[in-house]
Amino acid sequence: MRKVAILGIGQIKIDEHWELSLREIGGNAAFAAMQDAGMNKVDALFVGNMLSPLVDGQNQLGTYFSDWIGLWDQEAVKVEAACASGAAAFRAGLMAVASSDVESALIVGVEKMTDKAGHDVTSALATAADADYEVEQGISFVGINALVMRRYMHEFGWKHEDFAPFSINAHANALHNPFARLHEKITVERFEKSSMVATPINLLDASPIGDGAAAAIIVPAERVMSARGRPRISVAGSASATDTIAVHSRKDPLFLSAAYESSRRAYQMAGVQPGDIDVFELHDAFSIMSALSLEASGFAERGKGVRLGLDGEISPKGRVPVCTRGGLKARGHPVGATGMYQIAEVVQQLRGECGETQVDGARTGMAQNIGGSGATIITHVLQAE
Amino acid sequence: MRKVAILGIGQIKIDEHWELSLREIGGNAAFAAMQDAGMNKVDALFVGNMLSPLVDGQNQLGTYFSDWIGLWDQEAVKVEAACASGAAAFRAGLMAVASSDVESALIVGVEKMTDKAGHDVTSALATAADADYEVEQGISFVGINALVMRRYMHEFGWKHEDFAPFSINAHANALHNPFARLHEKITVERFEKSSMVATPINLLDASPIGDGAAAAIIVPAERVMSARGRPRISVAGSASATDTIAVHSRKDPLFLSAAYESSRRAYQMAGVQPGDIDVFELHDAFSIMSALSLEASGFAERGKGVRLGLDGEISPKGRVPVCTRGGLKARGHPVGATGMYQIAEVVQQLRGECGETQVDGARTGMAQNIGGSGATIITHVLQAE
């Protein structure tokens, strides 16, 4: 396939944007990416979104945004894979440019989750789980993750506070990210004392929702030169893999086989190993997911992901820097937009634009976006050239 | 881009399948396509669906179906563009195979719309229109189309009964399609006397909803030989284009500029002209849409699309055969599945499998799928080789 580069990125601050419509939220990120890329037109638009039919009463978001942005006549479509919708849209755009059918694509991940008259957000989020086999039993999405976390603690002997470093690192990094939802330093003590949500998941294990959008523009790599002090950022690896949608159907509910499979394929495509990854924007929707992602993606042995946090390896100065802009935990988790925030953040790291949380000399970065409880996992490896 | 061929197709009868779940409906079409292609595994699954979050309480349909079908580990994603979701999913699969990133893709268009406890279907369908600028005013989807039809009749001087041939042709052809929702011959008299839905659209101007699914398997064309008496069916042209999402924002609400643009690009890619199209599966959600599609796609002058029906040119023996398997009007319109029924039906025509409604010597066929009131229009040109 034709090599593709990321020419521009755009993000808006994740917040409760009661004053902004869904249109404006996505549009603002798209305009920022177009400005960053120095382009005012693209051939195709790919929108990642999960909840707009339920929460905003709006379908057909591709055309909804091509209309608002002023891309009349152009191709536009929405891609949905629950909380992995952002990366799924990015991958769809990548395929279109890689196939040579289009010469440029804008990808926007967007979600407006607050201040809406539509569905209750908790029940809307439950549509990522299996309606017949999980939701019908009355379980919520956080409930499913709580069962997984409890089993992990039992199986491998970890205590709840052992997960604190994931949350502390995310919050510490978000302090330096103007687009982050939360700007609040936390400690082990606060982590342990925060309100319980679904035992053993408490408030500081869980990521906050919010209104947000992030975008990127991609073009054939041959059209991009390293310039203006910026390296060329190419998409070196991309893969999507799936698991059973219901957690109880898995042979091993404590191993994210879709993360293993998608990262394996992405490494192979990029010709890299886990040890070559300088920065890893992982999908810490709940702290347990950080441990499971690190394990399945080859950074830790099974049951040992928590150890990387306890050993101080996950900070921007550590061996496996994760959530360097705050992660889902503190940057925030506007579900369908999250995957595009991860892509934009890896680009910022590879450009060296991350200031206090910059990973020194980052050349290869990885973004991993998860839909459902590990059901759809999409991994991208980006490289600065 | 790499040339792609359609190796297998599958359809289920469109009906009120109260005994079948969403899983089974989509799965049955997928299994039929796999059997037709002689394959039991594919690299990637693309699902076209519009309403499942609202009507079925289920998101992440890509993985939901990869799980059910037994494609564990494989890539899977859902693509949505309102009623053009089927063709949008097909195009996403096409890009993935054309890019050389995957070697085979299964595309399933699926919709379960009846016998559900979720949203009322009329309000769910309205999410294809603009929530802020159209739906908020209280208009339904059929209401928008009624305004367009009334204006067309006023502007070009047609009477309501002039639209009857579109409905009569669709119903006549559906009699010979076992997968069709309606098997019922109609006449001009019945057309004129049927119940009014939204003036001037009556029941026989409008397509029926239903539960349905259709699927196809695509692979690189170089891997397919003409065999077993079957020609190789290649995807010669594919293009998607958009218009404003709200009809009132258009310079000319009586011209489907996205149909013009997507058919123009698809013709160019395939190296054909409208006169080369032997069969045209168009998107007759309402009879007015048949006229507008024919005009914008180059088969009739502006305001003259109705004339093709009155002149008997749209039957399987005519100059521009449309809806040869019943169209949306009589085969049925399970919204997110419709685009894949159109693709499957064109393949049937090019294989010469259509019996009484076979277009003699059909070698080039076109499928055009519309999302919203002409907001997203996707055109595919298929060729038998």
Image (cartoon, coloured by chain):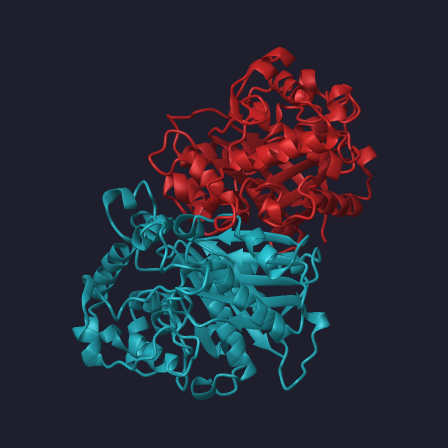
Chain colours: A red, B cyan
Q: Which residue is depicted at the point 69% across and 58% down?
A: B102
Q: Position of residue A3 (x, y in %)?
A: 72, 47
Q: Quadrant of residue B176?
A: bottom left
- Residue B377 against residue A360 in the figure, above or below: below
- Residue A159 against residue A241 in the figure, above or below: above
Q: Position of residue B341 (x, y in %)?
A: 47, 69
Q: Quadrant of residue B238?
A: bottom right
Query: In the drawing, does residue A305 fall left or right of residue B211?
Result: right
Q: Which residue is depicted at the point 51% across and 45% down?
A: A134
Q: Depth check: B297 or A309 in front?
A: A309
- Residue A168 against residue B218 in the figure, above or below: above
User: Which residue of the protein is positioned furthest toward the front in this rendering?
Assistant: A154
Q: Position of residue A195 (x, y in %)?
A: 51, 19
Query: In the drawing, does residue B162 fall left or right of residue B246?
Result: left
Q: Depth check: B123 or A186 in front?
A: A186
- Residue A36 against residue B271 in the figure, above or below: above
Q: Which residue is depicted at the point 29% across and 49% down?
A: B248
Q: How many marks?
A: 0
* Viewport quadrant of the N terminus of chain B: bottom right
Q: Position of residue A209 (x, y in %)?
A: 49, 29
Can residue B243 be seen here? The reply is yes
Can residue A283 be seen here? The reply is no
Q: Quadrant of residue A155?
A: top right
* Viewport quadrant of the C terminus of chain B: bottom right
